[in-house]
Amino acid sequence: MGDTMLVNSKDMLLDAKKNKYAVPHFNINNLEWTRFILEECQRLNTPVILGVSEGALKYMGGAKTIVGMVKGLIDELFITIPVCLHIDHGQTFETCKRAIDAGFTSVMIDGSKYSLDENIKETQKVVEYAHARNVTVEAELGLIGGEEDGVANKLAFTNLKDCQYFLERVDVDSLAPALGSVHGLYKGEPNLDYETMKEINDNIAVPLVLHGGSGLDNEKITKAIACGISKININTDLQIAWSNAVREFLDNDKQVYDPRKVIKSGEQAMKKVIEEKVNIFSNKNR
Ligand code: 13P
């Protein structure tokens, strides 16, 4: 297992940008989720980014535990697709540093709570540490709405001018511009600013990331990819598919108590959503 490779997101995202498709980012919550995602992405032969939020980081026992688990699964399941292990919405330099030291190959530093200049300063610190260790960095501009790890965020849109100002000062590898997407369930019809998305993509070289990919129908996803999105983050759609299947399983079997059977009962439902998303993201009909 010593030389099991995780890759950073650089090549996969640049290839996606060049060829107009999106790399899937799926958030992981435990060992089983990680296995289901790896197995299905291997079957579909797609590179994948495994996203770990700060909440999930704590839940799964910390960065070292997760790196060991992911590398172990890659080895034991004979996974050969490119796998990137990524911190999702890292809140501090310290979180990113610890993850990088443990073997994560990519981090997002979410400085969206700061002013633009403070965001630049915080992100720059992470970039220096990460790039010296071949780790890629994603940043957020504006504020992606919704709720994440129990924290509610009010959406704030960004624009091309701020993105250019930011990128002239910080050398990040991908950028998540807040353009109307929200984490978790959308209240009402999702309203993405595709025009600005395209304008930003046409004027900057860095691949763009769409957060809050759950709840967007195929048409919206395809349109976002056409406007230059190269990575799409999905968490809630998998959670809903898994929970619904497990709920049904438990309702139908009042005797079952084996946790392996319970957790596994959501496997096929999750894999089906993964397949659907990967097929849309791959933009095969382009
Ligand atoms: P969803 O839960 O809405 O899919 O958002 C996931 C995400 O953007 C993680 O950063």
Image (cartoon, grey):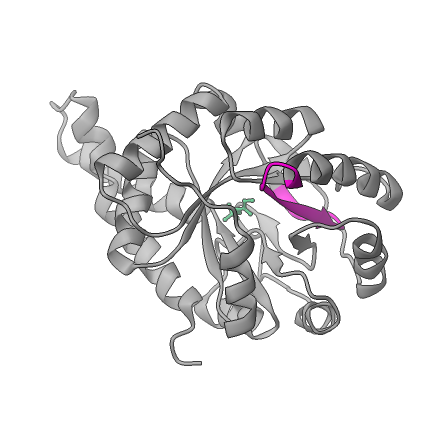
Q: Position of residue 82 (x, y in %)?
A: 39, 51
Compared across the picture, whether 61 is left or right of 3 comes to right
Residue drawn at x 44%, y 65% is: 281
Residue drawn at x 30%, y 39% is: 74
Q: Which residues make up the magenta segment?
A: 131-146
Quarter-of-image position of residue 265: top left
Q: Magenta stretch: residue 187 in it?
A: no
Q: Position of residue 185 (x, y in %)?
A: 52, 48
Compared with 204, 151 (above or below) is above
Quarter-of-image position of residue 127: top right
Quarter-of-image position of residue 248: top left
Q: Magenta stretch: residue 132 in it?
A: yes
Compared across the picture, whether 107 is left or right of 256 comes to right
Compared with 20, 5 (above or below) is above
Q: Position of residue 247 (x, y in %)?
A: 27, 36
Compared across the picture, whether 109 is left or right of 229 comes to right
Compared with 239, 225 (above or below) is below
Q: Is residue 155 visible?
A: no
| Quarter in which the N terminus is drawn | top left
Residue drawn at x 56%, y 26% is: 101
Q: Is residue 234 visible?
A: yes
| Quarter in which the C terminus is drawn | bottom left
Q: Position of residue 58 (x, y in %)?
A: 51, 21
Q: Nearer the viewer, residue 101 or 34?
A: 101
Q: How many marks?
A: 0
